[in-house]
Image (spheres, grey):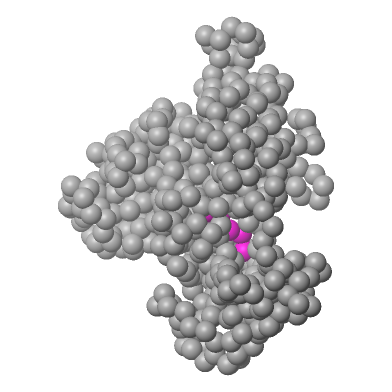
Amino acid sequence: MKRCLLFVFFVAATIAAQAQLEEDFNPTPAGWILSSGAGFGTVNSNSVIITPGVGGNNPANIGTPAVNKTSNTVKVCFDIWAYDANLNNQSTFPCATYADILFVNSAVTTSRDAEKPENIYARQDNYLLPTNGGTTCFTFTFPATITATDFKVFISFHASCTQSGTKYVFDNVSISGVTLICGGTNCAPVALDDMFNRGSGTETSFNGALYGSNLSYPGGNTVDATGTDNDQNDAYADLQWSVLTQPANGTVTINTDGTFTVTRSSTAITQLTFTYRLTDNGPDNSIATTADNMFDDATVTVNWPAGGTLPVSLVNFNGSRSGSYVNLQWTTNIESNNTGFEVQRSTGNGAYEKVGFVATKAVDGNSSMPLYYQFRETNTAKGNSWYRIVQVDKDGTRTVTPVRGIRGMEELSTLTVYPNPGRPGNMSVLFGNSAIRDIVITDMNGRVVKQWNSYRDDNMVIGGLHTGVYTLIVTNRSTSERLVNKIVVL
């Protein structure tokens, strides 16, 4: 269960910590306040809050446990969808549906008290929910006159019509700039999933750390910066890490300080997973007396590229539009027995056609130095086009690159994922412009599995996702505009 997260970022050679409340309702959490028929339930094997649709004088309220304010600006995000009364089919909201966000006295225990003016520190009203449902966020800055350091957050729904026969499915709440008040002197630790993408196909083992990018606890280890384990009331020296399950095709040794060594059984194994347990020392401050210790578990995924030397190592395949022309550029680091590159284009129907061929620049098809290639063609398609490079060996072997998307002549600046559904390592994102953006991919439980900050290109390739359903969240850093897209990996 991931409730209180601590993310650590590098900012001008210093570390700034930003905490947040995060809840996916699995298992059922304590301290949440539900009203108007709202309750915990399951939809499509996913733990959620289910509440009747609103209308008239029937507001549905969902309240969080008490939290401490760690920043004067907080960001509230949640997922919400409309369903039919039997929860069999997802639908659109029957009419304009709104959320009011109330920051109230932490002593409030009922939704009725949350609506009383004397208990409300601040509020944000009439936030319009997406017609088709999904993830929605807003940022709120407390006025200087609000000095309270702890509060509860209530989310109240109302609509412009009576929505009988409709139910809301509410999930994946996150509130940044706060920490959960655990209600005592012993708070449970939080272990976050880690992912390590290795660069060498010949590597059999490596050393890393499970605690994330915390420079105050031993450095010099490979870490996943988004998977920083933490505990509200214990120092890292008071915590211990241990193996929970070994990988199927290798071994892992985890030291009590959170460092580890993982070894794969052969270079043919391209992915390993294992789980670990993070344990605190309990109220008696002794890790040896286990009865009072609290713990959390997390999963580690390690990905390696395929072993061996490829005939051609192709990097930096990019494309852009200049008026009615499309320009493609790519680089190779190594070439062996290469004849050249076939350029293929698709207009989104799944079929690719050959539009050109670029011969190798390597003498006799062999090179150990970087070589640079480009291709230009006239493309006046109104919709998006998708390009890929097919490298051809002298023996006829063909290797296909991931695709790159190019905006159409009249295409709106929309977020596009292609192909979607797609397969791991074979999905391309076209953003529609070259703005600076922050990008997050979350799984169905709301856990962040990939994250990019200050991404500047107008397209990117997604790799390393396992089979499943994900949410792509793209935030424009200059305008705060937020785009959300579902990704299905087959």
Please state the horizontal and vertical placement of residue 37, each as a whole percent of the image: 24, 38
The magenta segment is 437-441
Please state the horizontal and vertical placement of residue 356, each as a whole percent of the image: 59, 87
Residue at the location (58% across, 81% down)? Answer: 343
Whether 249 is among the magenta residues is: no
Q: Is residue 275 visible?
A: yes
Please state the horizontal and vertical placement of residue 236, each as a whole percent of the image: 70, 25
Q: Is residue 232 visible?
A: no
Which of the pair 298/438 is nearer the observer?
298
Residue at the location (80% across, 36% down)? Answer: 220
In the rendered view, does 331 fall on the left or right side of 458?
right
- Tally the marks: 0
Q: Is residue 371 above or below residue 94?
A: below
Which of the pair 167/390 is nearer the observer?
390
Q: Quadrant of residue 301?
A: top right
Residue at the location (72% across, 68% down)? Answer: 336
